Amino acid sequence: MGLTAVERAELKKKAIELITKKKNEFEQEIEDLKKEHFERLNDVANYQKQHFRSDVNPTDTIKDVLQRELEGEPNVNDT
């Protein structure tokens, strides 16, 4: 014997509730991961600010930096 229309409707309602609950949990987990990711990026940026010279362009070679210092050119951040 099959389910009655009322039983099918109740099961459908429960299924929708469970799917919605799982969807919300996944969305929250995604938001948490995004937040964690941006916090890590911020930590990396802060580390770089503390441990690397701010007047050196990342694409500069040592020769470029020394040449600018010898010629007395302004730092990258001064321009």
Image: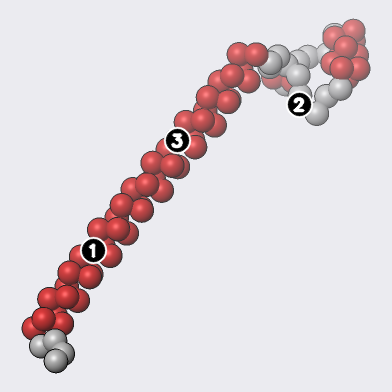
Nearer the N terminus, badge 2 or badge 1?
Answer: 1
- Check disc 3 and report its element: helix, strand or loop: helix
Q: In screen coordinates, is 15 left or right of 75?
A: left
**CA separation, marks 2 and 1?**
51 Å
Badge nearest the viewer, 1 or 3: 1
Asked which colour scheme the image uses, the reply is secondary structure
Nearer the N terminus, badge 1 or badge 3?
Answer: 1
Q: Residues within 10 Å of mark 3 (few under 14, many from 20)?
A: few
The amino acid at mark 2 is Pro
Residue annotated with mark 2: 58
Q: Nearer the viewer, residue 75 or 46?
A: 46
- Check disc 2 and report its element: helix, strand or loop: loop
Measured as percent of width and height from the top left, residue 67 is found at: 90, 14
- Which mark is on residue 18? 1
The amino acid at mark 3 is Glu
Badge nearest the viewer, 2 or 3: 3
Tell me the quarter of the picture where residue 17 sits: bottom left
The amino acid at mark 1 is Leu
Q: In screen coordinates, is 19 left or right of 12?
A: right
Identify the residue shown where x is 58% and y is 25%.
45
**CA separation, marks 2 and 3?**
26 Å
Q: Nearer the viewer, residue 17 or 39?
A: 17
Measured as percent of width and height from the top left, residue 34 is found at: 45, 42
Identify the residue shown where x is 70% and y is 14%.
53
Q: Is residue 18 above or below residue 52?
A: below
Is residue 78 visible to the viewer in this orientation of the structure? no
- Which mark is on residue 36? 3
Measured as percent of width and height from the top left, residue 24 is found at: 29, 55
Q: In screen coordinates, is 53 left or right of 64?
A: left
Q: Are marks 2 and 1 in contact (CB under 8 Å)?
A: no
Tell me the quarter of the picture where residue 18 sits: bottom left
